[in-house]
Image (spheres, helix red, strand yellow):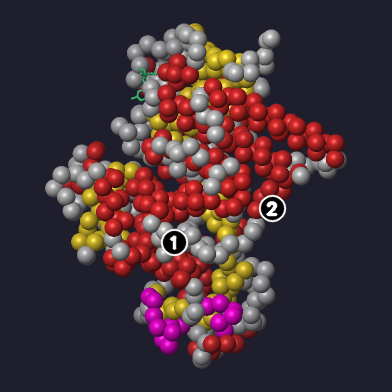
C-alpha cells in the first residue's frame, strides 16, 4: 500500500503551545513512523485543540481529536489526550498512534474512540531521560529548532535570507559565522546585530540540518564561538529590550543545568539565583526571596536560560511538593523547629564568614 | 581563642590544577607531599605531586578554613576517607586534555556520591578552550543521564577569580539547601 501523507492541524491553540508543537513536529518529522505534514483544518485527519474549544469545531467527526489537557482533567469521550505540560516523547508517541489507527482504517468513524478511555502514556513517567523542551515565541523559532537538532546530534545551519549564514557543530556546541563579515566578527558584535533585527526578520530565519564541510571544519578555533554563550547574551539583551518570552501565565521553573559562568562571568546575584532554581521548581517571586535579589534580575536570568534551553517549566504553583521532598522526615515539635531555625542561622552565618574571606559577601 | 575548623576538598586527576587552585586561595604557603607520578603517559606533567596539598585561611571570626588537595581516583580513596568527614564540600577539577575524562568523571562520581547528592560538589573543567570536546553541555548530558546534578564551569585554575567562582557556586548551593529545608519545616 502506498503510504499517504497524513495531515495535522490545530484549532484555537495559544501561541506557546502552537510554537511548541510546530517546532517539535518539524524537527521530529523524520523520526515518525508515518509521513506527516501540517495541513488545513478542513483536510487534516488529526486536529489538536483544547477541551474548551470543542464546541467551536465544526465537523469534528472527520477528525481524530487530540485534546491538550492536564493529566487529572477528565477525558472527553472520543478524544485522545496530549498531557500538559507538553513533552516531545508523548507527542511523538501520540502521532505514531494516530498514524497507526488511520492506517488501519479505524479512524473513519469517531466511534472507535468512544470506548477508548486510557490516555496515552505520558512521558512524565520518565521525564529526566528526554531533553527538556522550551517554549519560545515565533521570532525565536529558529533557536527552538537548533536545540531540537542538537539533541538529535545533528549539525545545523541557520539560513538568513535563504542562505546558510551560521553553522553549528553539535559535537562542540560551537557556532561559526559564514556571512556578513570579511574578518571574524566578535561574538558581542554578533549579539548586538541579532537584537537589532525585528521580530519579523528573525521569524524568517530557518534552521536546517547541515553537513559541515572540510573548509568549515578547518576554520581556526577562534572563529568558533560557544553557542551557549551567544544565546545567553542574546537572551539577556532581549530581556533588556523587554521582548517578552516568559509566558504570562504563572509558571514554576527549574534549572536542569547551570549556565557556564566560567565562560560567561557571573554577576553578583547569579550564582544564588542559579542555586535556587536548580534546587526546586520555583516561581520568579520565590527565587527573589530565596536568592535575596530583585525580580528584574530573576526575569532576565530566566529569559536567558530559556533561550539556552536550560529550563524546565511547569504550569501553576507546584513547588510545595518539591519543598516537601527536601523536608526532614520526622514530625517537628515547636522546640525542634526553634532548634532548626537556630541551626540554620548559625550555618548560614559560618558560610557568610567564609564568603567574606573570598570577598563574596552579598 | 582557638576557633572552629572547616574543610574544603579539591580533587581531580594529576595535572588538573589542584595545587595551582589551592595556591590561589591559601594564605599560607601550600604544603605538598610528593609521590612518584606513574601516570606520565596520560599527564602533561613530567614530574608531579600526586599525594596531597594543604593550604589554609583564617576567617574573620577566628575560625580556620583548611584546604586539602587530593587525587580523586579510587586507588587514593584511603586518603579521601580520612579527609571527607565533616568537609563542607568538594571542588572537582577535570582536565579536558585527557582522552578518558568522561570515564574519569564516572569514577569520581562513585567516590564522591554522598557529596554530589547533598549538593556539595562543583566541577571545574580546565583546558576546555584548547580541547573543545567534551563540551560543558556534554558533561551536563552525562550527569543528567545518571540523574545527578552539579554545577559545571569551564575554568582556568591559574585564575583566582575562577577558583573563587567555584567556591561561590558551592556556597550558594549549600546555603540554598539550608534555606529550603528550613522553609519546608516551618
Ligand atoms: N592551560 C592550563 N594550565 C593549567 C591550568 N591549571 C593548571 N595548569 C597548569 O598545569 C600544570 C599542573 O598544575 P597542578 O596545579 O600542579 O596540577 P595538580 O597535579 O592537579 O596539582 C601546571 O603547570 C599549571 O600551571 C588551566 O586551567 N589551564
Ligand atoms: Mg599537585
The image shows residue A109 at horizontal and vertical percentages of: 55, 89
State the residue at coordinates (40%, 31%). Answer: B155
The image shows residue B110 at horizontal and vertical percentages of: 57, 31
Quadrant location of the N terminus of chain A? bottom left
Quadrant location of residue A292?
A: top right
Q: Give the mark toward the camera: 1 or 2.
A: 1
Q: Which residue is mark 2?
A: A320
Decide: is B110 above or below B27.
Answer: below
Whether residue A257 is visible? yes
Give the extent of the magenta segment: A37-54
Ligand 1 is within 8 Å of the C-beta of the residue at disc 2 = no
Tell me the CA gap for discs 1 and 2. 27 Å
The image shows residue A135 at horizontal and vertical percentages of: 46, 62
In this rendering, position of residue A12 left or right of residue A40: right
Badge 1 crowding class, 10 Å Cα cut-off, few under 14, some 14 to 19, many 20 or more, is: few
Q: Is disc 1 placed on a helix, strand or loop?
A: loop
State the residue at coordinates (62%, 23%). Answer: B87
- In the image shown, does A198 or A362 lie closer to the viewer? A362
Q: Is disc 2 placed on a helix, strand or loop?
A: helix
State the residue at coordinates (65%, 57%). Answer: A318
- In the image shown, does A225 or A63 lie closer to the viewer? A225
Badge 2 crowding class, 10 Å Cα cut-off, few under 14, some 14 to 19, many 20 or more, is: few
| Mark drawn on residue B48 | none
Chain containing the residue with disc 1: A
Q: Which residue is mark 1?
A: A244
Chain containing the residue with disc 2: A
Quadrant location of the C terminus of chain A? top right
Amino acid at each position: 500500500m502506498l503510504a499517504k501523507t497524513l495531515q495535522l492541524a490545530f484549532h484555537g491553540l495559544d501561541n506557546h503551545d502552537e510554537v511548541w508543537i510546530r517546532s517539535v513536529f518539524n524537527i521530529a518529522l523524520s523520526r515518525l513512523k508515518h509521513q506527516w505534514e501540517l495541513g488545513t483544518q478542513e483536510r487534516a485527519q488529526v486536529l489538536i485543540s483544547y477541551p474548551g474549544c470543542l464546541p467551536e469545531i465544526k465537523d469534528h467527526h472527520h477528525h481524530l481529536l487530540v485534546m491538550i489537557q492536564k493529566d487529572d482533567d477528565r477525558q472527553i469521550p472520543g478524544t485522545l489526550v496530549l498531557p500538559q505540560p507538553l513533552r516531545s516523547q508523548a507527542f511523538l508517541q501520540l502521532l505514531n498512534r494516530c498514524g497507526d489507527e488511520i492506517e488501519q482504517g479505524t479512524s473513519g468513524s469517531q466511534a472507535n474512540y468512544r470506548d477508548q478511555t486510557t490516555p496515552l502514556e505520558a512521558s512524565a513517567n520518565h521525564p529526566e531521560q528526554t531533553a527538556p523542551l522550551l517554549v519560545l515565541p515565533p521570532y525565536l523559532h529558529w533557536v527552538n529548532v537548533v536545540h531540537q537538532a542538537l539533541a538529535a546530534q545533528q549539525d545545523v545551519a541557520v539560513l538568513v535570507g535563504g542562505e546558510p549564514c551560521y553553522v553549528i557543530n553539535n559535537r562542540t556546541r560551537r557556532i561559526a559565522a559564514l556571512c556578513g563579515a570579511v574578518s571574524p566578527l566578535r561574538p558581542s558584535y554578533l549579539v548586538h546585530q541579532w537584537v537589532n533585527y525585528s521580530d519579523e526578520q528573525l521569524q524568517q530565519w530557518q534552521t536546517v540540518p547541515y553537513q559541515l564541510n572540510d573548509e568549515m571544519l578547518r576554520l581556526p578555533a577562534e572563529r568558533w564561538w560557544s553557542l551557549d554563550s551567544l544565546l545567553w547574551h542574546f537572551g539577556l539583551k532581549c530581556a533588556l529590550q523587554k521582548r517578552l518570552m516568559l509566558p504570562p501565565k504563572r509558571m514554576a521553573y527549574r534549572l536542569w543545568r547551570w549556565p557556564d559562568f566560567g565562560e560567561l562571568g557571573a554577576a553578583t546575584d547569579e550564582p544564588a539565583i542559579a542555586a535556587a532554581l536548580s534546587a526546586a521548581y520555583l516561581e520568579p517571586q520565590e527565587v527573589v526571596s530565596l536568592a535575596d535579589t530583585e525580580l528584574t534580575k530573576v526575569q532576565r536570568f530566566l529569559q536567558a536560560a530559556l533561550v539556552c534551553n536550560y529550563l524546565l517549566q511547569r504550569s501553576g504553583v507546584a513547588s510545595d511538593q518539591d519543598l516537601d521532598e527536601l523536608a526532614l522526615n520526622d514530625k517537628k515539635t515547636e522546640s525542634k523547629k526553634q532548634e532548626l531555625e537556630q541551626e540554620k542561622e548559625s550555618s548560614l552565618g559560618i558560610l557568610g564568614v567564609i564568603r567574606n574571606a573570598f570577598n563574596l559577601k552579598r | 581563642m582557638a576557633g572552629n575548623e572547616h574543610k574544603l576538598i579539591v580533587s581531580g586527576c594529576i595535572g588538573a590544577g589542584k595545587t595551582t587552585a589551592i595556591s590561589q586561595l591559601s594564605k599560607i604557603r601550600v604544603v605538598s607531599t610528593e609521590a612518584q607520578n606513574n601516570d606520565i603517559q596520560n599527564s602533561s606533567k613530567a614530574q608531579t605531586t600526586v599525594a596531597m596539598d594543604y593550604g589554609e585561611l583564617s576567617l574573620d571570626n577566628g575560625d580556620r578554613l583548611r584546604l586539602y588537595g587530593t587525587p580523586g581516583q579510587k586507588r587514593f580513596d584511603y586518603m579521601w576517607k580520612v579527609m571527607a568527614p565533616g568537609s563542607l564540600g568538594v571542588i572537582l577539577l577535570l582536565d579536558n586534555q585527557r582522552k578518558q575524562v568522561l570515564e574519569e568523571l564516572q569514577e569520581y562520581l562513585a567516590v564522591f556520591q554522598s557529596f554530589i547528592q547533598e549538593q556539595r560538589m562543583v566541577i571545574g573543567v580546565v583546558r576546555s578552550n584548547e580541547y573543545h570536546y567534551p563540551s560543558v553541555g556534554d558533561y551536563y548530558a552525562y550527569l543528567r543521564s545518571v540523574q545527578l546534578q552539579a554545577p559545571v564551569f569551564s575554568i582556568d585554575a591559574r585564575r583566582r577569580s575562577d577558583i573563587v567562582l567555584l567556591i561561590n557556586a558551592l556556597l550558594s548551593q549549600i546555603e540554598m539547601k539550608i534555606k529550603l529545608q528550613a522553609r519546608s519545616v516551618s
